[in-house]
Amino acid sequence: MHALIVVSHPDPQSLTHAVAQAYAQGVRQSGDHTTEIADLAAERFQPTFHQGDRAAYLLQAALPDDVPREQARIDRADALVLVYPVYWWSFPGQLKGWIDRVFSNGWAYDETSDGRLLKRLGRLSVHLIGIGGADGGTYARHGYDRAMRTQIDHGIFGFCGAKVVTSEFLTDVNGTAAASHVETARRLGAATFASAHVAAAA
């Protein structure tokens, strides 16, 4: 099986990138699986939703050329993994722009003429790893964790029918917890396709 790991951080030496690499190692070490890391910063993905994207959303024009390439990467994957730093209690702008542009009308979902919504990503399993500087108590006390899960897990992926299998926050990266997060990511990666093996054996 194949996992597409999308990472959004400008510094390749960051903990975010180390977590993405460890997750990929866990996937590969758990069986005959493959991974691809999409490094949005290194690839210079343009996140701005522009007039071409708007015309495609209205089904008045074809998608801009860079969008179908990203959609094809997802179509090849059995699991989509997003690894990102938490900026202002949400995605970084580049990752949000990737979602805005790539999860397009006609591909991620369909809006029918009679107002119905058809969810088109029901086959896709999603794994989310947010990396935050604040401690877990701050997320819980202010409800940031719940708010992000409502916005991202339900609002984005639920809208498209994709199943969020795991949704993790690796917090307190400025404290003592950072050293353990890479190993946590490797463990999460190793478990990515575990349920698929169970289903196949049943």
Image (cartoon, rainbow, N blue to C red):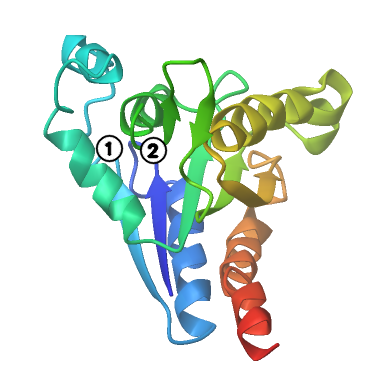
Can the viewer see residue 38 in this picture? yes
Residue on which the image places disc 1: 41
Q: Which mark is residue 9?
A: 2
* Residue occupying image coordinates x 40% and y 22%: 93
Image x and y of residue 29, in percent: 49, 83
* Image quarter of residue 3: bottom left
| Outermost front residue | 114
The amino acid marked with disc number 2 is His
Seen in the picture, residue 170 relative to 157 is either above or below; the reply is below
Q: Which mark is residue 32?
A: none
Image x and y of residue 131, in percent: 59, 41
Which quadrant would the C terminus be assigned to in this image? Answer: bottom right
Determine whether, in the image, residue 23 is placed left or right of residue 105.
right
Within-10-Å neighbours for mark 2: few <14, some 14–19, many 20+ = many
Which quadrant would the N terminus be assigned to in this image? Answer: bottom left
Q: Mark 2 or mark 1: name the one nearer the start of the chain.
A: 2
* Residue toward you, 95 or 173: 95
Seen in the picture, residue 31 relative to 82 is either above or below; the reply is below
The amino acid marked with disc number 1 is Ala
* Residue occupying image coordinates x 66% and y 63%: 184
Image x and y of residue 153, in percent: 64, 36
* Residue occupying image coordinates x 28% and y 16%: 49
SS category of the residue bearing label 1: loop
